[in-house]
Image (cartoon, rainbow, N blue to C red):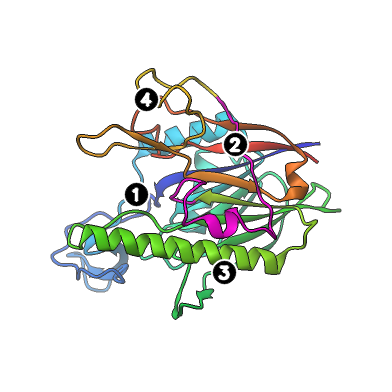
Amino acid sequence: MYVTVGTFNLNNLFSRYNFRGEIQAIRASETDVETDVHYEFGDADTYKIRTYMGRLVNEKDEEDTRTIADRIIDIDVDVLAVQEVEDIDTLKQFNRDYLNRMYRYTGLIEGNDPRLIDVGILSKYPIGGMTSWRHAVHPDDAATPVFGRDLHEVEIYSHTRSRKLFTIFNNHLKSHFVDFRENEEEGERDNTARRTRQAEMIAEIVKYRTRPRSAYIILGDMNDPPDSAALSAFVNDPNLKLVDGLANPQETRPPKADTPPPDTTAWTHRYKPTGLPAEYELYDQIWLSPNLAQKQTEAWIDRRTLHGGDGSDHDPAWVELRL
C-alpha cells in the first residue's frame, strides 16, 4: 500500500471563538496569555480573553483559513503533521468545518509556547500512542523546558491496527524572530543557540525511543535549512543516518518566474529582507529513518501562487511511501 505523509505550518490557526469587546487595559507580559475581563452587562458574566504581550489573540482570517483548508484538501495527504495550532478543539473544529471531516483521527498536546501555538496531527490512519516531550530539558539549562512548541511523538497504525506503520516526531523549532525592543544580534544568537539545543535533544530522544531498524519520520518546521549548523546534531548524527525525504521534490505548479532561482525547487519558506533579494529556504523538512527511506517513492511541495503565501507563509510538503 502507498501512504503519504506531510507537514504544513498553518500560520496561526487560532479559534474563531474569541469574544469581541472593548478592553480598557491588559497587562503586557509574555506569560499573560489569559485575562479575566468583565463586560458592561454585568460582573457576573466573565469570559476568558486570550492575550499575548498585552494584545488580543485574534482568530485566523476566514479567507486564509479556507485557503489553507483548500490546499490540504487538494494535496489529500494521508497523515499530516501541522504546526501553529491553538489547541485540540481548534484542530477538531478546523477538520470538521473546513476539511469536511477529511481526517478521522486528530491529535494535539499543549506545549509551552506563550503565543499559544502547538503542533498537532491529522490522520486517516489510526493513531496509537502519543507522547509529549514538552518537559524535556537540555543539560545546559536544566531549569527550562527546551521545546517551546513540544516535540510530539505519534504512532501511526494500519487501518486494522494489526501493525504499526511508523512513528512521527513532529517539531516546530525556535524561530528567528527578535522583538524590536531587543538587541537584534544578541537575539538572533540566542535563537540559534535554542534551535541548536533543540536539535541536540531531538537526536537524543529519537535514539532513546527507536532502534536501528525502526520506521520513523522526523518532520516539521525547523526554522533553518537542512545544511545549517544548528540542525546538524540530528541531521548528521551517525547513529540515526537520516535521509532527506525532500532532497528532490516535485512541485504541484511552477513558481512565478521572478520568485526563486531557477535551480531551486526544495524550498517552503520565502523571506524578503528590506532592500535585499528574497531568500528561499527549506524550513519545512521530512527526514526518514534508513528503514523508511528505502520505501520512499515520491516527494512533493505544494507551490504557492502568491509571494507571501496562500493562507500561510509556508508551503506544505509531503512524501509517498510504499509500505
Question: In the rendered view, does 272 fall on the left or right side of 141?
Answer: left
Q: Which mark is residue 59?
A: 1
Task: Give the mark nearest the N terminus, 2 or 3.
Answer: 3
CB within 8 Å, label 1 to label 3 = no
Q: Residue furthest left?
A: 24
CB within 8 Å, label 2 to label 1 = no
**Which one is in front in this view, the residue at disc 2 or the one at disc 1?**
2
Q: Secondary structure at mark 4?
A: loop
User: Percent from the top left, x then y, of residue 96?
Assistant: 55, 44
CB within 8 Å, label 4 to label 3 = no
Which residue type carries mark 2?
A: Ala
* Residue underneath mark 2: 247
User: Percent from the top left, x then y, of residue 246?
Assistant: 59, 38
Which residue type carries mark 1?
A: Glu
> Which residue lies at the image location 63% right of the left edge and 58% below the top edge?
237
Task: Give the mark nearest the N terminus, 2 or 1.
Answer: 1
CB within 8 Å, label 4 to label 2 = no
* Residue underneath mark 4: 259
Which residue type carries mark 4?
A: Thr
Instruction: Work out how far the residue at label 2 is from the one at label 1, CA to CA, in angstroms.
Output: 35 Å
Q: Which residues are magenta?
A: 222-251
* Residue underneath mark 3: 133
Of the pair 133 and 110, the residue shown nearer to us: 133
